[in-house]
Image (cartoon, rainbow, N blue to C red):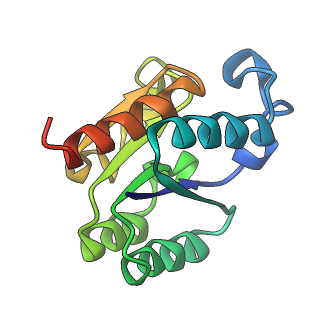
Amino acid sequence: MKIAIINGPNLNMLGIREPEIYGRADYNELVRMIKEHAERRNIEVSFFQSNHEGAIVDFIQQAYFDKTDGIVINPAAYTHTSVAIADALKAVSIPFVEVHISAVETREAFRQISYVRDIAVSTVTGKGFDGYIEAMDILIDRADGK
């Protein structure tokens, strides 16, 4: 199984940006944690982070041609603004889980809007980096028919 991990704007600033919300661990720690879990679950994982909406759309489309089985995506601020990312996810029809490090449902009103939630297999929020692991497991279990 191949899972793509996609992160949107400012997630490259983990550990620096608002550590009281996002924690002190950096993006490299997140990648390390996900790689270790992927090895335990015997799956292939790829990573992409961009601050640019079009680059994220391009990566989602490429995932289709790369025969990716699932996507874990944290669209970050694009969650609330990007019809283009939602349309790309619809276009490729790859099962995906929306993930957010913070509990977006308890934050500012604009963070309550998600253009991808209705088309996601599931949404995981407020579990920090562990949310990515849960999201991967959701996709793996789904592929295994659980």
Q: Residue at x 53, y 74 (%)?
A: 59
Indicate the quadrant where residue 83 lies. Answer: bottom left
Q: Residue at x 36, y 41 (%)?
A: 113
Q: Position of residue 92 (x, y in %)?
A: 29, 75
Depicted 57 relative to depicted 86: above or below: below
Say whether residue 12 is left or right of residue 80.
Answer: right
Depicted 18 relative to depicted 75: above or below: above
Say whether residue 114 is left or right of residue 24.
Answer: left
Question: The C terminus is located in which quarter?
Answer: top left
Q: Residue at x 56, y 42 (%)?
A: 39
Q: Position of residue 55 (x, y in %)?
A: 60, 75
Q: Position of residue 125 (x, y in %)?
A: 43, 26
Depicted 44 relative to depicted 132: above or below: below
Depicted 94 relative to depicted 129: above or below: below
* Farthest left residue in view: 145
Total marks placed: 0
79 or 34: which is nearer to us?
A: 34
Say whether residue 13 is left or right of residue 144.
Answer: right
* Farthest right residue in view: 16
142 or 74: which is nearer to us?
A: 142
Say whether residue 46 is left or right of residue 23.
Answer: left
10 or 133: which is nearer to us?
A: 133
Question: The N terminus is located in which quarter?
Answer: bottom left
Q: Residue at x 46, y 56 (%)?
A: 81
10 or 27: which is nearer to us?
A: 27
